[in-house]
Amino acid sequence: MSRGTVRELATPAEWRQAWPVLRELRPNHDEASFLAAVERQRPGGYRLAALCDGEAAIAVAGFRHLEMLWRGPILYVDDLVTREDRRGTGAGTALFDWLLAEARRLGCAALHLDSGVQRHGAHAFYFARGMHIAAHHFALDLTR
């Protein structure tokens, strides 16, 4: 069972604590570009929370509170990752449960996230928590 406390990370110094974990999910960033991206997204409601053991982050979530015409208010999870050496310890479950409680506190109708088609372990985690595949997500790369 995971030991630790979930807390919101509100300052750049705290965001740095999330980086060693989040880079496992987002290797396209280095620490500086990660911090800059968080800073740019904050005005749009992006928040970070982490399950921490002391000062060390074990699991990290990036999320935002949105309202969508088709669903109403939702908590959208952009990023959810547990440090590879702590997977299977309950850390991800503890953070997921915190996200559910935050969604309920905010009056959300649902929690949503997208997951890469190759992330089979993550899919098993989401299915085990009662999530289901509700839609296909389509994308068009405009950089080519």
Image: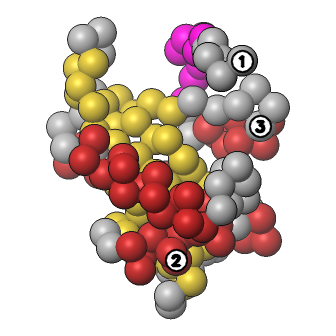
Q: Secondary structure at mark 2?
A: helix
Residue 110 quadrant: top left
The x, y position of residue 112, in whole percent, is 45, 30
Which residue is found at the position 23% from the left and 20% from the top?
72
List the residue tagged with mark 1.
144
Amino acid identity at mark 1: Arg
Q: Residues within 10 Å of mark 2 (few under 14, many from 20)?
A: some
Residue stretch rendered in magenta on the structure: 131-138
Amino acid identity at mark 3: Arg
List the residue tagged with mark 2.
17
Q: CA distance from mark 3 to mark 2?
A: 24 Å
Task: Choose between 11 and 136: the one closer to the eye.
Answer: 11
Residue 64 quadrant: top left
Q: In the rendered structure, which disc, 3 or 2, sits on the residue that comes first in sequence?
A: 2
Q: Secondary structure at mark 1?
A: loop
Query: On the rendered image, what quadrant is the C terminus found in?
Result: top right
Which residue is found at the position 39% from the left and 73% from the top?
12
Q: Residues within 10 Å of mark 1 (few under 14, many from 20)?
A: few
List the residue tagged with mark 3.
119
Task: Choose between 3 and 47: the one closer to the eye.
Answer: 47
* Left or right side of 93 for 64: left
* Left or right side of 136 for 108: left
